[in-house]
Amino acid sequence: MPTPSARRTAPLAAVTAAVTAAALLAVTGCSDGAGSAGARPVGGDSGARNGPTDLATQRLDWTACKAPSAAQGGGTAPSPLPGGVRWQCASMDVPLDYAKPDGDTIKLALIRAEARDRSKRLGSLVFNFGGPGGSGITALPSFAPDYETLRGRYDLVSFDPRGVGRSDGVECESDRQLDTYYAQDATPDTTAEEKTFTKNLTAYASACEKNSGRALPHVGTTNAARDMETMRQVLGDRKLNYFGISYGTELGGVYAHLFPKSVGKTVFDAVVDPSQDSEQGSLGQARGFQLALDNFAKDCVSRGNACKLPGTTPKQIEAFVTGLLGRLDKKPIAGIGTRKLTQTEATNGIAQTLYSQEFWPLLEQGLDEAEGGSGALLLALSDSMNGRDQLGRYSNLQAANAAINCVDSKERYTLAQTKAKLPEFRKASPVFGDFLGWGLMSCSKWPVPGRWTHPDVAAPGAAPILVIGNTGDPATPYAGARAMVDALGKGVGVELTYKGQGHGAYNSGNACVQKAVNGFLLNGKTPAPNTVCS
C-alpha cells in the first residue's frame, strides 16, 4: 500500500500467496524461459518488423513450461493437472507501439491447460488476475483447482501482460535498494522526512527510466487490451471469453470498449470502479480496508478470551493497532535476520491479511507477536505484498504496478496538494488513511505522462458481462460493481452481489457464486439481474 503505487487494486501477491506462521511461500508457475517456445508468423519469421497481419496470424509453439523467472516470482514449474494434463507455455509477438504496427515487437508470455472434453470445447478462457503487475503465468496454475469445472470445456489461458514478468518486464531498483525503499517512512511527519520521501520517489522513478525507459510509454492498459485482441485472433477464437479479477476487470472493461463486437462470455470479479480518478480510488480503498479491519476486530471480540489481542470492543482493538503502528514509527522492532519491522512494513503486512478472511488468524498472530517485540510474521506478510521471496529477490510486481498505473493516470500530485488531502484520508481510515493519502504522490516524479483521469469502458453492443461485487471487499469496494454496470451501458453489465469477506467472490468457494458463474460461462445462462449470494 505505501509502495510506489498505492492506486488501484491488490497486488497479485495478496491474492495468490500461500502463508504460514513463519513465512510466505511463493506461488508456483511457469514461464516461456530463455530460448523457449515462441511464435511463428504465417508467411514470415518472428522478428522486429512483422506487420499487423503477420501478428494476427502467427502460430504459437506450445511446449512444456519451465520454472518461473525471478521477475515472475520464482518457484518451480507447475505440477500436472488431474488426469496428468501438463501446462504448456509459449510466447506471442505484439507491437511495442501500436501507433507503429510495423515497427519493433515485444514478446508476451502465455500459459494454457487444454480442455478435458475436446468434443465439447467452447474455446479459450483468458484470465487476468489483477495487480496491475501480476504474472498470470504464475497465478493460473496456483488457482487451477478452482477452475477445474470450467476446464471441462475451455482451454484455460493466462499471460504476463506487457511490462510484467517475462513480457518485457519493467525493471527499477536493485533488490538491496528495494529493501531500503519499502522500509522507508511512507507517512512523513516532519520537513526532513518529507524531503527524504520525495527524494526516494525521484530516485525510484529515475531507476525505472534508466532500466526500462524504452518500455515505459507503452505498458498501459489500452495497449494491454489491444494485446488481448491480438491474442484472441492468434488463439483462433471468434470471440474473447474472459475472466477478469480485480485490475483485470478494468483491463476487461477497456477491452470491451475498444472491441465490443469481440466480447464473448465475460466475467468481472472484484470490480474496479471505472468512474473514479486516482484520488477517489485511493479513498475508496482507505474505507474498504478500514471496513475489513473493523470486521476482523468484530470477529476477534466475538471469540472472547480466545482472541489474543487486548480489548473487549472493536474500537479498543483498532486503538491497539494504531498504537502499535505509532510506536513502530518511532522505533522499529526485530524482524527477519538483520531486517527490522518498520511502521510502513507493518501496515503492509496488516493490509495483506485483509485480502482473505482465511488470513485473519495470521493478522491476529502477527499483531500479538509484534506487541511482544517480534515483527517476523508481519514483515513476511509485507514481503509477500511487495513480491519479495525468502532469498531477498523481488519479482517485478510492484515495478510493473507503478509503471502501468503511472502511464494510465494523468494525476501528478504535488507535496502541497497531497498534504491538503490527508485529513480526508485520515477520516476515511485511522489505520490506512495516511499511507494511502501519501500514496497520491506515487506518480509525481514519473518520467512518462499519463493517459486518462479514469478509463472509458462504455461498450454499446457488447455481449452481456457478468459483474460480481463483494460487500466486504477491501481493495475493490462493493460500489465499484454497480459503477461498472452503469459505465458499460444498458444491456451489457449484469450485476451479482456476494455478501462475503475478502477480495473477490468466485475463489471464496461460495457455491451460489460458482454456480452462477459456471452456468453463465458453460451454458450461457445469465443470472437474473441483482442476484444476491451469501
Image (cartoon, rainbow, N blue to C red):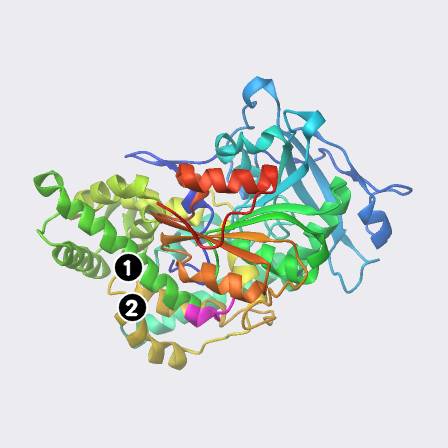
C-alpha span from label 2 to label 1: 8 Å
Label 2 packing within 10 angstroms: few (<14), some (14-19), many (20+): many
Q: Nearer the viewer, residue 33 or 352?
A: 352
Question: Would residue 315 appear left or right of 194 to someone viewing this image?
Answer: left
The x and y percentages for residue 299 are: 19, 46
Observer-nearest residue: 521 or 154? Answer: 521
SS of the residue at dot 1? helix
Residue 28 visible in this rendered orientation of the protein: no
Quarter of the N terminus within the rendering: bottom left
Vertical arrangement, residue 303 with respect to residue 82, above or below:
below
Q: Camera-side residue: 433 or 347?
A: 433
Q: Quadrant of the C terminus?
A: top left
Q: What's the magenta region? A: 274-280
Residue 361 within the segment the image draws in magenta = no
- Residue 420 drawn above or below residue 135: below
The residue depicted at 72 percent of the width and 56 percent of the height is 261
Which residue in the structure is indicated by mark 2? 428
Q: Position of residue 381 (x, y in %)?
A: 34, 44
* Side of 296 where 247 appears, left or right: right
Q: Which of the 4 image quadrants contains residue 42?
A: top right
The local secondary structure at tag 2 comes to helix
Amino acid at the residue labelled 2:
Ala
Q: Is residue 333 left or right of residue 94?
A: left
Q: Residue at x 24, y 39 (%)?
A: 361
In the picture of the structure, the residue carrying the numbered disc 1 is: 290
Q: Sort mark 1 into few (<14), some (14-19) or many (20+) by Cα contacts within 10 Å.
A: many
Q: Is residue 319 visible?
A: yes
> x and y percent of residue 325 in the render?
22, 58
Tell me the amino acid under the disc marked 1: Gln
Query: Outermost residue toward the right?
Result: 43
Do residues under tags 2 and 1 come within 8 Å of each other at their CB atoms? yes
Q: Is residue 492 left or right of residue 233?
A: left
